[in-house]
Amino acid sequence: MPIKPENKKRYPANWQEIRSRIQSRAKDKCEWCGVVNHSWINSKTRMMCLSDEENAIRVVCTVAHMDHTPENCADENLFFLCQKCHLKYDAPHRIETISASRLKGQIRIPFLPEPVKIYPGCRRSAAMVPEL
């Protein structure tokens, strides 16, 4: 995945060298599913195909940090992954960080200990909030 501009400073100066080493270790293939970097595959079957075939997508492998910390560039923390494997691995972390970003600076109101009671028959539904 591309490095976000705000995270560039977190990567070491020799990042391209590290990336190349991990790519070579992986033999230019996804280390998890084995798809070849920059090849064309059918998005439905994941089988290799020609670029002009229906459902053809280009595979782009990138280096993934298993601990999601760009400063940790130990070889055992880095894997060369296709976009499908990388996104699948990152999904829980992305949900967590997106949720945290959306809530940043907002006031958190705890849930009520009991469900709110609605009075039937009222034109306006009045809620009775239990005492805490």
Image: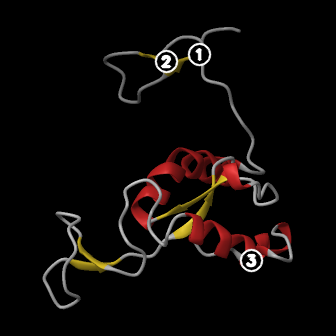
| Crowding at mark 2 (Cα within 10 Å: few <14, some 14-19, many 20+) | few
Image: 100 above or below 23: above
Q: Earlier in the sequence, mark 3 or mark 2?
A: 3
Give the residue type at disc 2. Val
Q: Which residue is mark 2?
A: 116
Mark 1 or 3: in front is 3
Circles 1 and 2, Cβ within 8 Å, touching? The answer is yes
**Residue beneath the point at 68% across and 50% down:** 77
Give the residue type at disc 3. Glu
Q: Is residue 130 left or right of residue 121?
A: right
**Residue beneath the point at 38% across and 72% down:** 36
Tell me, for residue 78, which label it has, or none.
none
Q: Point out residue 130 in the picture as x, y percentages from the top left corner.
A: 61, 10
Q: Secondary structure at mark 1?
A: loop
Tell me, for residue 17, which label it has, or none.
3
Give the residue type at disc 1. Val
Q: Which quarter of the picture shows residue 4?
A: bottom right
Q: Earlier in the sequence, mark 1 or mark 2?
A: 2
Circles 1 and 3, Cβ within 8 Å, touching? The answer is no
Q: Earlier in the sequence, mark 1 or mark 3?
A: 3
Q: Point out residue 6 in the picture as x, y percentages from the top left corner.
A: 78, 73
**Residue beneath the point at 33% across and 16% down:** 120
Tell me, for residue 129, which label it has, or none.
1
Circles 3 and 2, Cβ within 8 Å, touching? The answer is no
CA gap between label 3 and label 2 equals 59 Å
Q: Nearer the viewer, residue 81 or 118?
A: 81
Q: Nearer the viewer, residue 6 or 67?
A: 67
Q: Secondary structure at mark 3?
A: helix
Q: Point out residue 87 in the picture as x, y percentages from the top left corner.
A: 47, 58
Q: Is residue 54 left or right of residue 109?
A: left
